[in-house]
Amino acid sequence: MTATLITSLTIFVLALFVGYYVITKIPPTLHTPLMSGTNAISGIIILGALVVGGASEDTASEILGVVAVALASINVFGGFLVTERMLRMFKRRGGDPQRR
């Protein structure tokens, strides 16, 4: 393995640990608003992974690019589902029509 690949894998694993510990320290009431904000960041991650994976000549970099695109896509779609569920909680269910 090349030194660049080992460095890239080390950064990737460290980012996984940091991300996990940051998310577990956030109170549950803030998860939904933060999920809405991370959708934009995940979109940028998808674009970056596509650029890096497409420009690489190494098979391992292409595989990591595909993994990054897949994980960021799951985050984007999950974020939209959670946000939609949160917004449905605030809609009225046929309540008083005079209270608009």
Image: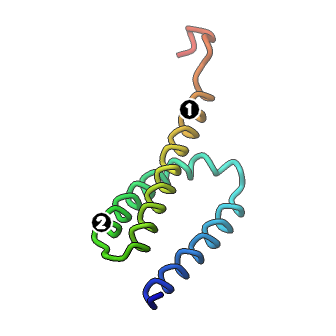
Task: Identify the disc placed on residue 62.
Answer: none
Which residue is situated farthest in the bottom direction here?
3
Residue 86 drawn at (x, y percent): 60, 35
Q: Give the vertical position of 46 relative to 96 (above or below).
A: below
Task: Identify the disc placed on residue 87.
Answer: 1
**Earlier-in-chain disc, 1 versus 2:** 2
Left of 54 or right of it: where is 88?
right
Nearest the viewer among 58 and 29 is 58
Label 2: few (<14), some or many (≥20) within 10 Å?
Answer: few
Nearer to us of marks 1 and 2 is 2
Left of 21 or right of it: where is 43?
left
Q: Give the vertical position of 37 relative to 65 (above or below).
A: above
The residue wearing badge 2 is 54
Question: In 3D space, how far apart are the residues under numbered discs 1 and 2 (Cα atoms)?
Answer: 37 Å
> Residue, x 46% and y 51% (percent of image)?
73
Kindly identify the amino acid type of the residue bearing the numbered disc 1: Leu
Kindly identify the amino acid type of the residue bearing the numbered disc 2: Gly
Residue 4: name its quadrant. Answer: bottom left
Nearest the viewer among 99 and 11 is 11
> Residue, x 55% and y 50% (percent of image)?
35
Residue 10: name its quadrant. Answer: bottom right
The secondary structure type at the circle numbered 2 is helix
Q: Are marks 1 and 2 in contact (CB under 8 Å)?
A: no
Residue 45 drawn at (x, y percent): 41, 61
Label 1: few (<14), some or many (≥20) within 10 Å?
Answer: few
